[in-house]
Image (cartoon, rainbow, N blue to C red):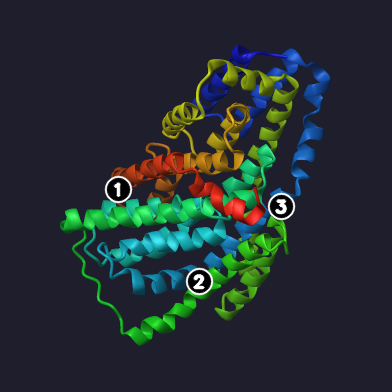
Amino acid sequence: MIGVTEASIGFLLLIAFLFLGLHVAVAMFLIALLGAALYLGPPLVAAFGTQLWGAMEDYVLLSIPLYILLGEILVRSGSTDRLYRSLADWLNILPGGLLHTNIGASAVFSAVSGSSVATAATISTVALPSFRKRRYDTRLVLGSIAAGASLGNLIPPGIALIVYGAMTNTSVGQLYAAAVVPGIVMTVLFMGTIILIALVKPDLVRQKEVADPLRERLKRLVDLMPPLVIFGIIMGSIYTGWATVTESAALAVVVALPIAAIYGRLSIRMLHECFIATANLTAMSLLILAVAFYLNFVMGLLGVTPALGAFATSIGASPLELIIALTIFYLLLGIFFETLPMLVGTVPVVFPVIVAAGIDPVWFGVFIVLMCEISLISPPVGMTLYVIQAVRREGTIAEVFQGTVPFFIAMVVMTALLIAFPEMALWLPRISFGP
């Protein structure tokens, strides 16, 4: 058994390893190995193999590669290009024009892909060519794409929500329900930010979009159907009790295949590319997650969880004070780390504290994913910023950094709203699953 002091030293050592550039899986494994060797002995060090196998047996984790595969199929089928064009027909009328399509398309694609990085890469590829001939401020274009991509993990079926649920034994179905309203509110806030900028500084959005005939726009509405149908299958099958989270992901993949066939993109070569990309992303994600489970196992045997719970009770901080402190902590941490390292590196330490403080684990899951998503648009480490710049292949990364500032502020406002009105995240799970 160890106390809070030893646990704090281990956490700081983990942060130090990450600052030195070690891969997050290596850093967490070294901390777990050190704790097991110093306090538990060789048998618990050797237990890593058993823990690795046990962690990867979790049926819920099978949904991660399935959602990644779903996103890959939709991207390569051309569905996202059609989605973007159809949304542009109706969102261009708002002040800010085509910028709203970046947010809207990201929100819809997030509802079927579950990955912020995939959303950033996909929407950048589709959107940037459309802006090259238009008179929009480059920084605002890049910032709107980055902001839209940050919805990737917040809007169900976000992969980060699955990871959090698996690490804390929280219902993924309830987490999905809890994230629906905050995801919609965040989308509206982003669009409101664009409207405000367009009204206050119209010189940044000089392009006046010309609407196509109503008949053409109505005809293209059919292109919105594939992602909406898939989202309906995912959420509907979960909340009617017809399928689990993993089974709903498999159903969505099955539905995506005929969509790719209808668009004329389904082929052995296309599927091979999808499988390779899925395997690469899955291996990277699950390696980190497997080591995180081993670290959780070691911390449990060392008594870190009850020690942190007792510490949270002893300091007498109110739940609100604790959440405000965690908000500041995650905002600072997000400057240096991306989503997955932040999530798996801090949940084992923070979760016992919030449970002891009486904070709802489902609400906290939405909160921590939102804080991790802020890290994706926080210079200088924000992963989506570099993905967008890599797709862009011109200009400087500084332009991407500058473009994210107003949307970063919008996300901080969203965090304040979530803290002030926790029912935003809790009322739908209560309706769907009961108290």
Q: Nearer the viewer, mark 2 or mark 3?
A: 3
Label 2 Cα neighbours within 10 Å, binned few <14 / some 14-19 / many ≥20: some
Instruction: Give residue 79's position: percent from left, percent from top.
Output: 51, 71
Q: Nearer the viewer, mark 2 or mark 1?
A: 1
Q: Which residue is mark 1?
A: 403
Q: Which residue is mark 3?
A: 62
Residue 392 showing in the rendered view: no
The residue depicted at 46 percent of the width and 26 percent of the height is: 321
Q: Are marks 2 and 1 in contact (CB under 8 Å)?
A: no
| Three-letter amino acid code at the position of disc 1 | Gly
Q: Secondary structure at mark 1?
A: helix
Give the quarter of the figure containing the N terminus.
top right
Q: Secondary structure at mark 3?
A: helix
Give the Cα separation between the discs numbered 2 and 3: 26 Å
Instruction: Give residue 421's position: percent from left, percent from top.
Output: 45, 43
Residue 78's label in the rendered image is 2
Give the Cα separation between the discs numbered 2 and 1: 28 Å
Q: Residue 138 vs residue 126: left or right?
A: left
Instruction: Give residue 219's position: percent from left, percent from top.
Output: 42, 84
